[in-house]
């Protein structure tokens, strides 16, 4: 009996509320739920992804998500996200590391001599290093880059496969979109 009276009292008070208060409550609830909504990506695709550096080695099925502001890479193992990478214009967040500037990420994970936008370009399938060593092919393009003691890179974007290999620094980033 007490619960019914209390419920009725709440309903009665809500009905008698000022319109502005009702709007305020509605928009507050809307913004709380909208803020928790996940980002929408313009392009989503499953892929076989390999990410190997001297410090990290992941290879399994995963997903690539892209929109105009960021690229997100997830590699799954046994149905659980084992590796996550969020690449934005000025910083990169990796599941095992804190977020850091793109240049700091290159220094810690890849190679400090790489341009800061290299990882974003690789996962977008775009030319790297301002198209140095660029060769257009029938199915895409390849790039060969060499700087003594720094890097020896073979990078190709052909059909649905992207492959970045630096033999000096033992780095392999490869993915094939399904």
Image: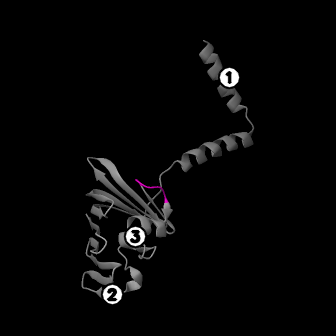
Magenta region:
95-99
Q: Quadrant of the C terminus?
A: bottom left
Using the image, tell me which numbered label, if any, was put on residue 119: 3
SS class, disc 3: helix
Residue 16, relative to residue 8: is it above or below?
Answer: below
- Residue depicted at 62% across the width and 13% down the height: 2
Using the image, tell me which numbered label, if any, was put on residue 133: 2
Closest to the observer, 35 or 176: 176
Q: What residue did someone put label 1 on?
A: 9
Q: Residues within 10 Å of mark 3 (few under 14, many from 20)?
A: many
Could you tell me residue 161's position as x and y percent? 26, 71
* Mark whose residue sits in front, 1 or 2: 2
Residue 34, relative to residue 171: is it above or below?
Answer: above
Could you tell me residue 101's position as x and y percent? 50, 65
Q: Earlier in the sequence, mark 3 or mark 2?
A: 3
Q: CA distance from mark 1 to mark 3?
A: 59 Å
Q: Earlier in the sequence, mark 1 or mark 2?
A: 1
Q: Earlier in the sequence, mark 1 or mark 3?
A: 1
Q: Residues within 10 Å of mark 1 (few under 14, many from 20)?
A: few
Using the image, tell me which numbered label, if any, was put on residue 88: none
Residue 114, relative to residue 82: is it above or below?
Answer: below
In the image, taking residue 155 as reference, residue 9 lies left or right, namely right
Closest to the observer, 49 or 17: 49
SS class, disc 1: helix
Q: Residues within 10 Å of mark 2 (few under 14, many from 20)?
A: some
Could you tell me residue 150's position as x and y percent? 36, 78
* Mark whose residue sits in front, 1 or 3: 3
- Residue depicted at 36% across the width and 72% down the height: 122
SS class, disc 2: loop
């Amino acid at each position: 009996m007490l619960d019914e009276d209390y419920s009725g009292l709440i309903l009665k008070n809500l009905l008698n509320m000022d319109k502005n208060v009702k709007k305020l409550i509605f928009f507050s609830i809307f913004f709380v739920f909208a803020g928790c909504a996940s980002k929408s990506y313009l392009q989503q695709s499953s892929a076989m992804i390999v990410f190997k550096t001297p410090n990290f080695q992941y290879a399994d099925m995963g997903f690539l998500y892209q929109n105009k502001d960021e690229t997100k890479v997830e590699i799954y193992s046994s149905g659980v996200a084992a590796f996550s990478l969020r690449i934005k214009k000025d910083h990169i967040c990796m599941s095992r590391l804190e977020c850091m500037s793109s240049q700091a990420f290159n220094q810690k994970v890849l190679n400090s001599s790489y341009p800061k936008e290299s990882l974003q370009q690789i996962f977008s399938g775009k030319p790297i290093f301002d198209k140095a060593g660029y060769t257009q092919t029938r199915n895409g393009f390849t790039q060969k880059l060499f700087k003594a003691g720094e890097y020896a890179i073979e990078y190709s974007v052909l059909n649905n496969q992207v492959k970045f290999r630096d033999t000096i620094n033992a780095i392999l980033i490869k993915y094939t979109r399904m």
